[in-house]
Amino acid sequence: MYRAPALFVSHGAPTFALEPGLLGSRLTELGERLSSAGAIVVVSPHWQTCGIRVTGAAWPPTIHDFGGFPPPLYSLTYPAPGSAALAAETASLLIDSGLVAMVDPERGYDHGAWVPMRYLRPGADTPVIQVSMPHNLDAAGALRLGKTLAPLRDRGVAIVGSGSLTHNLYEVRRDGENAAYAKEFAAWSRKAVLAGDVEALLDYRQVAPSAIRAHPTEEHYLPLLVAQGAAGSDAPMAIDGGITYGVLSMDSYAWGVA
């Protein structure tokens, strides 16, 4: 049976939906390799809950969970179907592993899900469900979450952790050179991911250069660990996404891509 890949995608700022930069076309190319996937599960930091929730709507709406951006952003939609059956199966998988989980029959896709999905599967022709991140999730918990979701890959379901390889919104800039610390942190992360150094990735806040500056809060880095957990022993592939707004590394990764 087809084994679907695991991905970590940097979604950067909401304007990524209008400004594809280096990464957009590369995600679309990568997404062509997802055509055999029966469905896609996305974990995004923009849906944080007590416990874990899973979208169960037949047609999850597009949520524009941001403000102050160009008006065209608010007219974009991602009309992919959901899957109540997969949502129930995913919730059961999480509960069986000792996690608290439930299906949310009304929740839609936040921009951490629909923005990258517009590039990965622009035809919105593959069912997508979203899994929330618990409020108290840490690095070890994110890895565990990915490992718990990993069996879905053997059923042809791709796992996508959507975050941002660096995410310091306090230092966003439209002009000037890319910040040295963002480049250094991205280079360190790439080395660790390609080496399969899971221990370093878990301990990144202590061992990575400028980790706290690159991630004042953890939520946008944790999806990388979700994807790493879902990847198992598969070899990683790096996808160079460049840096947007001077500080947001868009580097992404894929595991199990033929």
Image: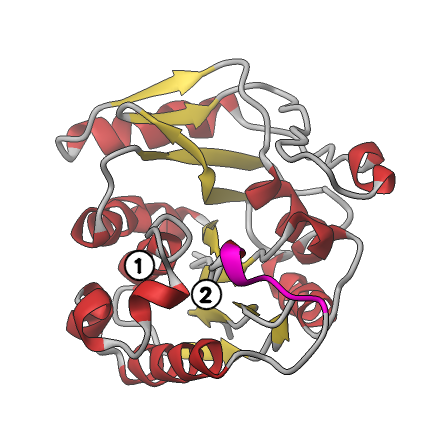
User: Camera-side residue: 252 or 3?
Assistant: 252
Q: Is residue 28 left or right of residue 100?
A: right
Residue shown at the point (79%, 34%) measured from the top left: 74
Q: Distance of mark 1 from mark 2, alpha carbons? A: 14 Å
Q: Earlier in the sequence, mark 1 or mark 2?
A: 2
Which residue lies under the disc numbered 2?
Answer: 166
Q: Is residue 173 magenta?
A: yes
Q: Is residue 10 above or below residue 195?
A: above
Q: Position of residue 141 (x, y in %)?
A: 19, 46
In the image, the segment drawn in magenta is 170-174
User: Camera-side residue: 215 or 110?
Assistant: 215
Residue shown at the point (17%, 30%) measured from the top left: 96
Q: Is residue 164 magenta?
A: no
Mark 2 Cα shell of 10 Å, populated few (<14), some (14-19), many (≥20): many
Q: Quadrant of residue 234?
A: bottom left
Q: Is residue 87 left or right of residue 241?
A: left
* Magenta-drawn stretch, dominant element (helix, strand or loop): loop
Which residue lies under the disc numbered 1?
Answer: 225
Whether residue 5 is visible to the viewer of this picture, yes or no, is: no
- Residue type, mark 2 in image: Thr
Mark 1 Cα shell of 10 Å, populated few (<14), some (14-19), many (≥20): many
**Residue most toward the top?**
105
Q: Position of residue 48 (x, y in %)?
A: 38, 32
